[in-house]
Image (tube, rainbow, N blue to C red):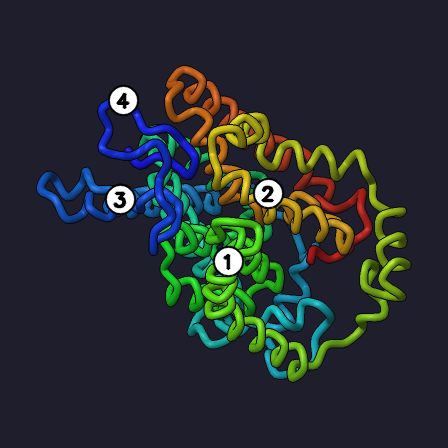
Amino acid sequence: MTPELGSVAPAGSSHSAQTPAGPAGPWPADRLSHDRVGGSWLRRPTARAAGVGALAVLLMLLLDLVILHERGVSGDEPFYMAMARHPGRPHNFPYAYRVAIPWLVHVLPFPQVVGFTILGVLAVAISAAALFLLLDAFDVPHGLSLGLCVGFTLSPVLWVVVVRHFRNVDPASVMVMILGALFIVRRRRIALGLTLLFGIGVHESTLFLIPLTYAVWATRLADPSAAADTARVGLLPAVVYLILRARVPAVDAQDIQGYAGSFLQARWSLLSHVPLGVELKRLAYTYGPVWPAAVAGLRSSAFARRGLVLVGLCLAAMTYATDWNRVMFFAAPVLYVAAGVALRRRPRLAMLLVVALLATDLGYGIYLQTGGVVHGIDHSISHVPVV
């Protein structure tokens, strides 16, 4: 087992009391050595991660086949559908800059709904597989990792995506965040840079990975070496995003609550109209029992503590938009790792966590089918875009 920064190695371990911050950084090994030793291929983490991804595909397709879908279009759907039909035209702010998924749908040789479904299912599968590998990097037992990955796949945010025929960028957005976190932990600079380049075309909030990179790679508060490494990874994606903002035409920005007016006026205008009870309820069931487990994991996981940078950025983003549950979904890699680390040596509590998480997911799914789809998921909230 590879202890985290500041942790004490088990008795008899070859590790010293603290993992040194060498060239690979003060983080758990990614355990790629498991793929270089003998033994059954099916027992290796990468093979199991592929199995988790395949399971996610089956779950998504099964849900899409049997559940009741929302009639018509609502939420963000009209914007992404219009972008997929006419990618070269001006589109509504801020959706106009989220070009990757609609443009891919446009070039795929399938009907639009099929294109969105293919990309959405693929993104969820990659997210689940990457989450499994991320949890494995922190020595979370594979049984608990599998339960968390299934709970993630069936999470309320993704339930809504399926109900709306995947015509959304949420699956691709969280895929970028989880892959980015995995490459940050493994210090795969090129892979992280490429992930960020794709991410800026999916959703602007994937740029949150840049400060997370520094927070994880730095060995002290002001670390010039980590800052230089972070700049090498993040500078090109940031510049490309600025070019995207400058070159892609967007309309009606002045009509979007949370963006119109001065900075302080826009924040107050949005927050004063937020249905606080509804948003807090959505935040609660988005992660369910993962919330208290993640809090418990802060004590034993340095990655989780440094990952509070990502949670803080999500909290700040909530002053730009409602749909707070979707905003906080960007912090999934940090929260799931924190929960997994907290319970990796407590099998009974881990089992209770997985059961409670699946019960939360399925309970939300039942509510969505019996109430949300029938009456309209957003019927009680005037539409305000997620950042």
Going by the image, does 174 lie left or right of 364?
left
Q: Nearer the viewer, mark 4 or mark 3?
A: 4
Q: On the image, numbered disc 3 is attached to which residue? A: 31
Residue 308's label in the rendered image is: 2
Callout 1 environment at 10 Å: few (<14), some (14 to 19), or many (20+)?
A: many
Asked if disc 1 and disc 2 are in contact, CB closer than 8 Å, the reply is no
- Label 1 – label 2 distance at C-alpha: 22 Å
Residue 328's label in the rendered image is: none
- Label 4 – label 2 distance at C-alpha: 30 Å
Q: Residue at x 66, y 51 (%)?
A: 313
Q: Residue at x 63, y 77 (%)?
A: 242
Asked if disc 4 and disc 3 are in contact, CB closer than 8 Å, the reply is no
Secondary element type, mark 2: helix
Callout 3 environment at 10 Å: few (<14), some (14 to 19), or many (20+)?
A: some
Q: Quadrant of the N terminus?
A: top left
- Residue 374 x %, y %: 69, 40
Q: Quadrant of the C terminus?
A: bottom right
Answer with mark 2 or mark 3, whichever residue precedes in sequence.
3
Answer with mark 1 or mark 2, whichever residue precedes in sequence.
1
Q: Which quarter of the figure has residue 269?
A: bottom right
Residue 11's label in the rendered image is: 4
Answer with mark 4 or mark 3, whichever residue precedes in sequence.
4
Q: Amino acid at mark 4?
A: Ala
Q: Which quarter of the figure has residue 192?
A: bottom left
Going by the image, does 77 lie left or right of 25?
right
- Label 3 – label 1 distance at C-alpha: 26 Å
- Label 2 – label 3 distance at C-alpha: 25 Å
Q: Amino acid at mark 3?
A: Arg
Residue 172's label in the rendered image is: 1
Q: Amino acid at mark 2?
A: Leu
**Residue 55 seen from this side:** no
